[in-house]
Image (cartoon, coloured by chain):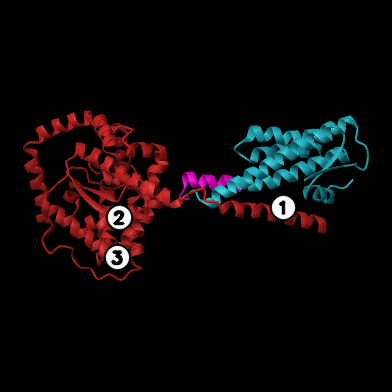
Amino acid sequence: MEKILIQFAVLVISFFGLWFLLSRIDFVDRDQVEKFAAESEQKLGEVILESITLTSEEVNNKKLQAMLDSIKVRLCEGKQLDCSKIKLHLVRNSEVNAFALPDDHLVVFTGLLEYAENAEEVAGVMAHEIGHIEKNHVMKKLTKDIGLSMLFSIAGGEAGGKIARETARTLSSSAFDRDKEAEADAFAVEALSAANIDPQHLSDFFFRLARKHDQPEELVWISTHPDTDERAEKIIQLKKNYTIKPEPIFHTDWKEIQRLVFSYEEDDNDDLGDYDAEADSVVDMTEEVGADTVAVQ
Amino acid sequence: MAQVSEFVYRPDDYESEKASNSYLMSVVAVIAGLPLPIINLLATLFFYFGNRKGTFFVRWHCTQALLSQVTVLCMNSAGFAWTISIIFRDATVTNTYVAYMITVVLFNIGEFIATVYAAIVTRKGQHVSFWFFGPLTALICKD
């Protein structure tokens, strides 16, 4: 029996000893991998954003940008996040949607501003998307859905514009898995509470989306964020863990801001025909844009 | 690692073939079952149950083959689960992971060589006892 125990001990020690000694070797140069990953993520974010702005124009209205920026700053300051790293983009699109892209890009569609009943609802959606950014859900989702090698070729411009557009579509119109959505919701409640914004608004937004039985195609955010009823209730539950002294984000009427969005849309609608034609022709040239990206590198 | 010695009696040719097959079973199953480590254990387990009422020599070697398979299965299963969590979940490739996989591969190679060696030696009617698994089998398997 003693012999068996000794031999067992030798076997176990040799296994763990060999494992320990081998683990001392630097197989994975973490610094290099992280640097490479960061550079690729940055290029990936640029390529995907470019593919979005080829078909939907980025809004350059200073008032609207300042409005979204102030929501972002309020959220970041409450949670003490690095605000500067989140690159906010307002894109002219009637879909009720907002989504995160690689390299901390946050895209908000004008459709969301039109559909939201107040700035707090927009803040709720933005806090949720910042949650995806902070928890690095975007790269995890893309790595899982598309594969690391494909992501590197998109970032390198070798994959072509069509795949970049597909990747953008994946991020803008498909859901994260249930755990990640729950994690982003919890982050949103925490961020909103820290910023003295009542998370009830996000919950109301979810409920309102869920109550829409005849959902128009524009309500994309609901299709990418399933189980809205259940999640709205969970937000109310989570909210109880925080002490909130709600303070309004803006003292101006939300309808005023919405009018600004509508007027922007109307202004642009005047030459919409020209814009669309141009966009279409640009989309056809996406392959060439991909080639340019390689040249830039 | 493997010690050839005299068994308590001289096995006949039929027994030697059966005992040799218990090792061959796991070797063939390793090739067929990769990368699922459970396959070779199941194959050895079926062979063990099929021969547990066989002669002492056959039972002894079936037991030794099974015990060595169980140990390798545990190592492989942990490696398999770790790899799956890297591919589908949030785990990342680290030095510890690479070192573990190399260790497991080395132990698998060692076990594979020992198994092939045992299959050849037992086919000749000789008795072979592995390091640790031999004495353990002797403790479990009684005449």
Chain of the residue displaying label 1? A
> Mark 1 packing: few (<14 Cα in 10 Å), some, or many (20+)?
some
Q: Which chain is cyan?
A: B
The amino acid beneath tag 1 is Leu
Q: Are marks 3 and 2 on the same chain?
A: yes
* Residue A122 location (% of width, % of height): 22, 55
Q: CA distance from mark 2 to mark 1?
A: 49 Å
Q: Report the front residue among A273 and A62.
A: A62
What's the residue type where badge 2 is placed? Ile
Q: From the top left corner, tell me how far across and down residue A247 is, in percent.
A: 20, 68
Please provide percent x and percent y for residue A57: 16, 41
Q: Which residue is mark 3?
A: A80
Q: Point out the tag, 3 or 2, that comes first from the N-terminus.
A: 3
Residue A109 pos. (x, y %)? 20, 46
For the residues bearing labels 3 and 1, Cβ distance under 8 angstroms: no
Q: Which residues are magenta?
A: B78-91
Q: Nearer the viewer, residue B47 or A212?
A: B47
Q: Residues within 10 Å of mark 3 (few under 14, many from 20)?
A: few
**Where residue A11 is drawn, which disc sits there?**
1
Residue visible at 6% across and 43% down in the picture: A267
